[in-house]
Image (cartoon, grey):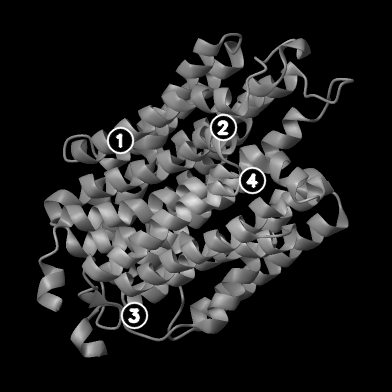
Amino acid sequence: MVRTLRSTSPRLTFAVLAAGAGFFAMLQSLISPVLPTIQHNLHTSQNTVTWVLTAYLLSASVFTPILGRVGDMLGKKRMLVVAMAALAIGCLLAALAPNIGVLIIARVVQGIGGAVFPLSYGIIRDEFPAARMSSAIGAMSAIIAAGGGVGVVMAGPIVAALDYHWLFWIPMIVVAATALTAALVVPESRVRAAGRINWGGSVLLSGWLVALLLGVSKAPAWGWSSGRVLGLLLLAVVLAVAWLVAENRAANPLIDLRMMRLPAVWTTNLVALLFGAAMFAIYAFLPQFVQTPSGAGYGFGASITEAGLLMLPMLVAMFVAGIVGGRLEPRFNARAQLISGAALGTVSGAVLVFAHDTRWQIGVAAAIFGLGIGLAFASMTNLIVRSVPAGQTGVATGMNANIRTIGGAIGAAVMSGVITAHPLPSGLPREAGFTHGFAALTVLSLAAVLAALAVPTARRTARHTARPTVEELVPVTAIR
């Protein structure tokens, strides 16, 4: 059986990984455009229906790094199948949900599937030849980035042709088939990290992530000065400090903080935080801008489907940039691509500040930002993967994805506060609100450029990268 798995084509392995990761990414944004439809059909309030998004975000933030670490230790293929199975079960439960409570629980289950990101990158590192690793990671990053945008584009047509339940039925069918295929054809990890799972560290990590993300994501609705938000942010700080102390003292830390302090790792994670804030702001508010009725003095009164089509140039650009960026990495290194990606985000934000009166201007700005996302996603992952021991790939890329999500929550909250600060008498945001929001987006992208310039060069990275010890990296046979 092992020989059969080892003979699996890398292309087939990649196709399986891409299907799982792509559909999870799609589910991140597929629901956002149709929240009013779900609210109406399930007879709930606007405040309650937003938990459909929040529950997914919180669940993914908890399970992504933890299952990434478990995969490093117990086998990436094994945990990949578990994550995909949970995603399929969550989709099934959501498709059948009779009320909002069940739908929120289903979204929590779906969030477990977030582990497909770090596990996929770890499998690529284990199974692909070194010469093909950068291009494979670039292609996977492009699929993940584009998947989030595909959700915005596809939501309208699916609901118009069928109904919102099919936003879950379609992913359920594909992901269930992918999980079965993964169990049959994806090779199991040849190298794993030693040690035990640090459950205390897992609880503390989950606690501060949930408190931080819940506080930030709900701040626009509850108010930044509300007792609930301030209490959650304070709790996040207390739990984060406790987690850092516990991880430093642990014999088997969940996340090796020495790895997180590597120059190439912490600088890349800082870029992920800033660029994630800019990216999620674009995803959330550019469609809202074009859907604003023209009677407000701006906007185009676009439908959900039309708004998705205006995002299409961004999807095409990010996919192409991700694919090409990985292949160009030997000549146009990951650091240079990261700087270029953040710079393109800055240019896109500036375009939106000064030119947003016609659809073609929106399309051009979106395409420029898409190029930036494609380059940045691929380069960030390549920098992390090349900077950490093989036995820490899953947890390191999982934390990078989490930090990007934290940035996204912060960016969306800041953008929401800026845009809605002084609404029109009709309740719609003023054009100046969007202009100021696009300016904030530009500042975030510029800060990401400065952070990317701090990423060490390849020579400095090689000198500072920690070498795996016997405790960090051992053969599978030694664990068994």
According to the image, label 4 marks what residue? 410
Between discs 4 and 2, the one toward the N terminus: 2
- For this view, does 455 lie left or right of residue 349? left
According to the image, label 3 marks what residue? 74
Labelled pair 4, 2 in contact (Cβ < 8 Å): no
Tell which tag, 4 or 1, sits nearer the viewer: 4
Q: As shown in the figure, which amino acid type bears the numbered disc 4?
A: Ile
Can you give x and y, in whole percent of width and height, for residue 318 in the image?
A: 38, 33
Q: Secondary structure at mark 4?
A: helix
- For this view, does 310 lie left or right of residue 175? right
Can you give x and y, in whole percent of width and height, for residue 469 in the image?
A: 26, 78
Q: CA distance from mark 4 to mark 2?
A: 13 Å
- Neighbours of disc 1 within 10 Å: few (<14), some (14-19), many (20+): some
Vertical position of residue 86 compared to residue 382: above or below: below
Between discs 4 and 3, the one toward the N terminus: 3
Between discs 3 and 2, the one toward the N terminus: 3
Q: Residue 336: which disc?
A: 1
The C terminus sits in image quarter: bottom left
Front residue of 380 and 6: 6
According to the image, label 2 marks what residue? 282
Between discs 2 and 1, the one toward the N terminus: 2
